[in-house]
Image: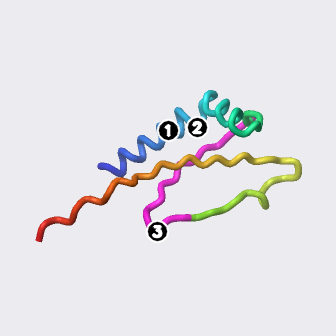
Amino acid sequence: DKKAELGRILDEIRQNLLGSRAFCRLLEWLTGVPAPVKWKSEIRRFRPGLDYTVGHYAGLLQKGEALFDVCLCFVDDSPPPPPPPP
């Protein structure tokens, strides 16, 4: 099943890339913000035209607490398959 395979691949990316020391060093190099002491990753798959939510955590942070939010996106921009013949 394609959806199950996609979920497995995205979970591998979450486990092996987002939490890696190399990725943290890259973010530190790009932003100048020191590598996080702790982190949490989440994988979300959006369905075209159905799912999209923008939010921020500013109201949820305690005084003196900071949050570094990173979004890594993959987009399938291949053309749709042709319709079946009549």
Q: Earlier in the sequence, mark 3 or mark 1?
A: 1
Q: What element carries label 3?
A: loop
Residue type at mark 1: give it.
Answer: Ile
* Residue most extreme to the left: 86
Q: What element carries label 2?
A: helix
Which residue corresponds to mark 3? Answer: 50
Identify the amino acid type marked 3: Leu
Helix, strand or loop under label 1: helix
> Which stretch did the figure color magenta?
37-52
Label 2–label 1 contact, CB within 8 A: yes
Residue 8, image x, y percentages: 41, 42
* Residue at 29% across, 49% down: 1
| Left/right of residue 82 with respect to residue 51 in the rendered view | left
Q: Horizontal placement of 57 versus 6: left or right?
A: right
Question: Callout 2: 10 Å neighbours few (<14), some, many (20+)?
Answer: some
Q: Is residue 46 above or below residue 50?
A: above
Residue at left 68%, top 48%? 69
Would you say residue 72 sits in the magenta stretch? no
Is residue 50 covered in magenta? yes
Coordinates of residue 5 in the picture (x, y in percent): 36, 44
Mark 1 highlights which residue? 13
- Viewer-proximal residue among 33 and 65: 33
Question: In percent of the image, x 46 and y 68: which residue is there?
Answer: 50
Which percent across, then down, holds residue 25? 67, 30
